[in-house]
Amino acid sequence: MLKPHVLTPNSAPFLFFSHGSLLSSHRSSSLRLRPTAVQLQKIGKRGCIRCASGEVQSSSVDSGAAISTLKAVATVKMTVGGLLSNLGLSRALDVTADLLGKSLLLELVSAEVDPTQTPSGLRRLRSKELENKRGDGRGERKDFERIYDYDVYNDLGDPDDDDDKARPVLGGSKKHPYPRRCRTGRPRTKKDPLSETRSSSIYVPRDETFSEVKSVQFSAKTLRSVLHAVVPSIQTALIDYNLGFPYFTAIDKLYDEGFTLPKQEGVGFLRSMIPRLVKVITDGTDEVLKFETPALIERDKFSWLRDEEFSRQTLAGINPYAIQLVTEFPLKSKLDPQVYGPPESAITVEMIEEEIGGLVTVEEALKQKRLFMLDYNDLFLPFVHKVREIEGTTLYGSRTIFFLTNRGTLRPLAIELTRPASPTKPKWKQVFAPCWDATGAWLWKLAKAQVGAHDSGYHELITHWLRTHCCVEPYIIAANRQLSAMHPIYRLLHPHFRYTMEINSLARQYLISAAGIIESSFSPRKYSMEISSVFYDQFWRFDMEALPADLIRRGMAVEDPTAEHGLRLTIEDYPFANDGLLIWSAIKQWVQDYVSHHYRDSSHVLEDYELQEFWNDVRTKGHGDKKDEPWWPKMDSPENLIHILTTMMWVASAHHAAVNFGQFHYGGYFPNRPSIARTEMPVEDLQREEFIKFLEKPEDALLRCFPSQIQATVVMAVLDVLSSHSPDEEYLGGEPELPWVHDPIIKAAFERFNGRLKEIEGIIDGRNRDPKLKNRFGAGILSYESMKPFSKPGVTGMGIPNSISI
């Protein structure tokens, strides 16, 4: 079917609306209306101009039928300044046209009303519209255009500015496979004909740009302010890029006193843009960068030091996607032993059984599924020597082993750090464990700092950027290229694509670009994006992005038809999984209700060529480097369509929320989650001066390992912004799209979805008060609220927006 069910037996009639450009070739058959009144109404969050009692000037429509009266509704977005608020109720539509600088044209292109098919008059128009949106792949895009095309990530480097800023092209090759981004068509660089030149702004199709509310609240006042003004101010104020914090009380001053920033354009310049971060000294004119105390530290200032909190955050922190079950022992690397040496881990059975304290043997622990791991060995090990060539940073491959206690909590047993062999040094690896002597205890703290930096880098590059922002952009491009705006699946997905392309363009400009925030402040440094490409190549699969599949893949759940959601969790008190499965199931039920209404059997799915082309675009173009993989689901039944859509909507909403909005809570005090480890373990070379300094004053060794003052404050400022909800945030299941309101079946289904999400909020609140759930309740423990669907504006650590909008 072109046949998407535009109108169903219970649907409200649909009128195609245009500003004129789309229908310009059909002006001879237009139906011009002169409304007798303009009425401004509030429908949900939208202002609508209702035009009624129109009289026909031409009735040469497709059917040749004469129509004397027609009622139409045009939706006009309100401006921040309330531009339309000054319109009187009886002002003519011509006044509105003058304000907008363009006349409105309502054109009736078909008088047919077929309850299940697209009216013939619209078929050619929707086909032409999609053809225009696909573009021809030529020329540089302009900001007023609505063209959606694909390109590789060839704009991250800036070789013309500095040879050290040259970066490989990601995507389109076997060496660096990657999802596609939106094509901009900018000129190529002089030094690298494969790379695009960088510019002060990046093209985003105009339908994807921030609304005025979002632009004022988010773009102008927050992220851009931090990147344009605060970051340079921090660098000017602190001067020495490598200067660390001299003592822990100096870290505390960031929250208690802050530090003075250089003066900007005028008094209160930065404070007016980001009042949460920048304060003004009482009775003075100096602006001070002063951070709010993160919720984790507000509850328990010393929580970051405790092993139980280190472990708990793998299940209920900001990166709950990395923990996995240990299924075999000894642990072995899958890297080439000719290059990286013997694959066996240095963590032995004896070490594990000593730490367990004789409770069970390693063999019994494996059978009982009580050993778990953070495994950053094979992903990071090939980059260790490259990263170490960069001043002020280091890197290891790492494995961290945890034991599931009888109380349902995890206890860390061992950390293995590995440096592969080099032409001048042999391979080095050592295992660190919780200790009861001073030297061993401090080495354990340093090893945890190294792992914390590994986890931070993996979280930002893989769990956050790659698996949500980056992989969703091809879905958005494909939907706009192949699904018309009236297509029911486009209508379902559209709220989950809001602002994602614009926020991704900002990320390419400032965060993941050469010498950007990620490269400057996270452990992999200039190799950060290459590492994300390696992960995409080796591990990313669309069929594994569904929450149940992800949990099963990591050994954190098994299928069990008798259990809730059809899964039995390996760790019963796994807050992210417990709450996430509630959200996953709610989304799936809503999608099932919606799809079942529009697609009654497999033939309807197979015959919908817009839908088939959309899925083909996603697989063969948007994720073209993986187009031949056998694991792609087939778009051949309502059941598969439901699963595909649920996965896309989950990733864009709940997955992203789980790894984004708690960032300041956990990373705002950087000793808890250092973004980078700057120094090597002092025992890597016992002859070096660093080992002597460590023995004399181990606290200084830990502070030198942590991020520098510039790195820490820049990352904290960015995390504060990224953790914030905008006042115009649209939450999962919050407000229905207007077309759904007019369809009683869809309206009822959405109301059930909304009701279920409100019910889930109550369930989560109840779980956070349950003393039996040690991973979310206890003295000083931060409640797990990342999967609570709704939130007030600001940094709250809760709320699931429909889309990746920050």
Image (tube, helix red, strand yellow):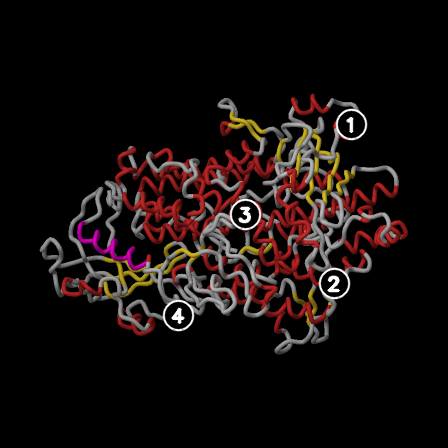
Q: Is residue 529 magenta?
A: no
CA separation, marks 2 and 4?
50 Å
Where is mark 1, residue-wise?
A: 350
Whole-percent x, y for residue 182 in the image: 42, 57
Residue at the (71%, 26%) spot, across then down = 406
Whole-percent x, y for residue 476 in the image: 41, 52
- Viewed as shown, does residue 440 lie left or right of 272? right
Q: For mark 1, give the secondary structure.
A: helix
Q: How crowded is mark 3: few (under 14 residues within 10 Å), some or many (20 or more)?
A: many
Which of 383/207 is in front? 383
Q: How many labels does the image show?
A: 4
Q: Which of label 4 and label 1 is nearer to you?
A: 1
Q: Does the magenta stretch include residue 126?
A: yes
Where is mark 2, residue-wise?
A: 242
Residue 657: assigned label: 3
Secondary structure mostly seen in the magenta stretch: helix
- Which of the two labelled residues, at mark 2 and mark 4, occupies the earlier sequence position? 4
Label 4 close to label 1 by CB (< 8 Å): no
Q: Which of label 3 and label 4 is nearer to you?
A: 3
Whole-percent x, y for residue 771 in the image: 68, 33
Q: Is residue 669 visible?
A: no
Residue at the (34%, 53%) spot, across then down = 481
CA separation, marks 1 and 2?
41 Å
